[in-house]
Image: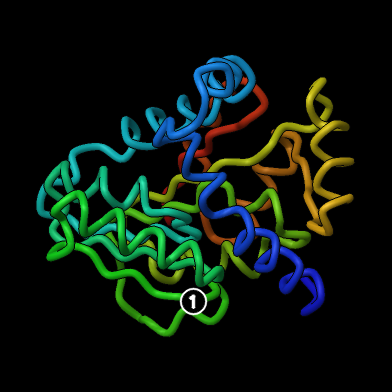
Amino acid sequence: MSASEVNKVIDYWNRQADAFDSIYSGQKSGWARRLDKWLRKDMYQRLDWVLEHSGDVRGKSVCDLGCGSGRFVINYAKRGARRVVGLDSAPTMIDKANALVSEAGVKSACELRVENILECRTDEVFDVTLAVGVFDYVRDGVPFLQRIRKITGQRFLATFPRLWTHRMPIRKVRLTMLGCPVFFFTPKQIESLMDRSGFELKRLDQFGAIYGALAVPK
C-alpha cells in the first residue's frame, strides 16, 4: 500500500471509532439497531466464528492486529487468555479500546498500542493471531501476512470481504466517496495469499458478505 492509502485508511477509522463500536454496543436508536441486525448480521457472526475457531485460549497469548475498539481483545481476556495484545493504526480506536478494556475489568491482561502491522516492533510469538476487518483495506496482503506469520505460533484467523455480493458495489462507492480504499476477494485469492505468505489454509467459511479463514504456519 502507498503511504497515501495508509493515511486515508487511518483518517477514516479515526473518524469512525464511535460509529463502528456502536454496532457492538447497540448505543443507537431502536430502528438503527434493527437495521444493523439485518444488514450487518455477518459482523456479529464473524465475532462468534473467530472466537469459536480460536480454540481454548485459557493461559495462551493472543495478538489482535487491527483491534479497532477492542471488542475481540475483551472477549479473549474474559475467556482466560494469559496475555492479549491489540494493535491498531488509528489512535482514536486505541483510545476507545483502552476505555472499554478498563470498563470491562480486564486491563491487567491486555496491552493496546497505536501501531501498524508492518511496523510491529515485537518479536514475541503468540499462540493465536487474528486480523479481522484488516484486509478490506489492504491492496497487497502478502507483506502483511508474512509479518503476521513471523509472530504466529499456532493458529491465525482472518476475515476477507467477498467479491461479487449485492452489497459490494454499495460499499465500494460509499467508502470511495469517504476517501477510503476497499478491496474484495475470491476463495482462490485468499488461498494464494496464505500459501505465498507461509501459511497453510485449514478452512474457509462464508457468512454473509464475509469469508472467515483459519490458517496455521507451514
- Depth check, front residue: 59 or 20: 20
x then y, percent, for residue 31: 57, 17
Residue behind mark 1: 115
- Depth check, front residue: 23 or 135: 23
- Where residue 218 sits, quadrant-wise, is bottom left
Q: Residue at x 51, y 50 (%)?
A: 18
The kind of residue tagged 1 is Glu
Instruction: Tell whether 189 sits left or right of 85.
Output: right
| One can see residue 135 in this view | yes
Dot 1, crowdedness within 10 Å: few (<14), some or many (≥20)?
some
Instruction: Tell whether 166 sits left or right of 161.
Output: right
- Where residue 134 sits, quadrant-wise, is bottom right
Quadrant location, the N terminus: bottom right
Q: Please, which residue is most extreme toward the front here?
A: 29
Q: Residue at x 57, y 21 (%)?
A: 207
Q: Is residue 129 above or below residue 169?
A: below
